[in-house]
Image (cartoon, helix red, strand yellow):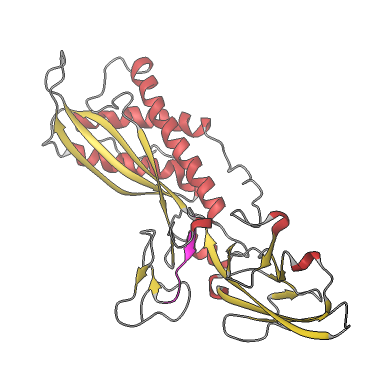
Amino acid sequence: MAGGGGRPCCPQQALLGVVAIVAVVAEAQQGAPGAARAAPEEEQLSVGFFQKNVVYGNDQRAENVYVKVFTNSPTLVCMDLTLSQDEVIDPRYSWTGPDGRNLEGQGYANLTSSGELVLLGFQESMSGAYKCVLSHRIIETSTQKEVAVTNTYRFMVYAYREANQVYQVSVRFTSKGCELAANTLFVEELKRILEDLISELMSRVEQLSHRCHSLEVPHRGSPSELFITFQVNPFAPGWEDLCSRLPQDCEGTANHRAQQARERIGEFFRKQTYALKHQFQTIPAIHYVEGSFSVTPIDSCRPGFGRNAVAHRSCAGCCVVCSPGTYSPDSAGSCRLCVRHRAARYGAKSCP
């Protein structure tokens, strides 16, 4: 519970604003949902695929396929759509993966006798070129002559993740002056309260900073105000380790909790206005500036993934695994070219 119960009160007059925060933080917590709502059931795939979750081959070009990590791929068909409408005589299928290894008998590859492939529990290391060779016969109607035909189909399969939701928050508080040491103490106390408010949601407050400015306001003189900014991140310490142990992707759940954290913080600041108007006879020296709360969502990708609307037009908003020769060391959201040594694998976080 936020509020610092049992902690000694700060003697500085400027920190009376903390009292206003503490007075309503409990109400803000009670008004916020006590537990995360169940995340909507995620589709196995959510971008640009053919109907019925089936992708047919094309012997003229490789088909790009995007698979969300830890889900199953769509059904890859070793046949083009036109050929699938005709009779195919004595078909034989041979699938190979990105390393050139035959996929027959591989635990992650579900193959059918009709040449269909589903990749199970897809991970970034499974990304790459998948090739299928279809051998069959054509019988000429007039001569009954049999002709052996071979078709080759290629699929470029990429792992992707949904973008992480980070929220940039800005808010303002009045102050008696910009040179007061109490301003820094107040901001530290505010950060502690906000962290307590969202800690159960596994989100965190980070990159908090503040600046003080003197303003010229008509009919109000020259008040000083604290301009405070911070980010709400969906991955609190330890959450990434938890993600690595889960059998499924955790971005959706984490982003949902980050949204809840944003809503709790927004409600918290809205209740500051009510507290100042109805619960205090004397306005605290540091207090919330009504209507100053604002939020800007920022999308970011996990290391090893990036967004590229040109290279991956069918999945422009996705965080797609970095291809060999590129890497992404942070959450900047793009894959960079290796300058000297080429990264030989998908999802590289650095160059060798």
The residue located at (53%, 70%) in the rendering is 124
The residue located at (44%, 81%) in the rendering is 344
Residue 94 horizontal/vertical position (percent): 72, 83
Q: Is residue 314 above or below residue 3?
A: below
Q: Residue furthest front?
A: 142
Residue 152 horizontal/vertical position (percent): 66, 78
Looking at the rendering, the stretch of residues picked out in magenta corresponds to 318-324
Q: Is residue 11 visible?
A: no
Q: Quadrant of residue 149?
A: bottom right
Q: Is residue 281 above or below residue 87?
A: above
Q: Quadrant of residue 51?
A: bottom right
68 left or right of 229? right
Query: Which residue is at the front of the view, 168 or 35?
Result: 168
4 left or right of 41? left
Q: Is residue 87 above or below residue 309?
A: below
Residue 225 horizontal/vertical position (percent): 19, 30
Query: Which residue is at the front of the view, 30 or 48?
Result: 48
Q: Quadrant of residue 116?
A: bottom right
Q: Is residue 147 magenta?
A: no
The residue located at (46%, 53%) in the rendering is 164
Quarter of the figure with the C terminus: bottom left
Residue 50 horizontal/vertical position (percent): 67, 56
Query: Which residue is at the front of the view, 252 or 175?
Result: 252
Q: Is residue 320 magenta?
A: yes
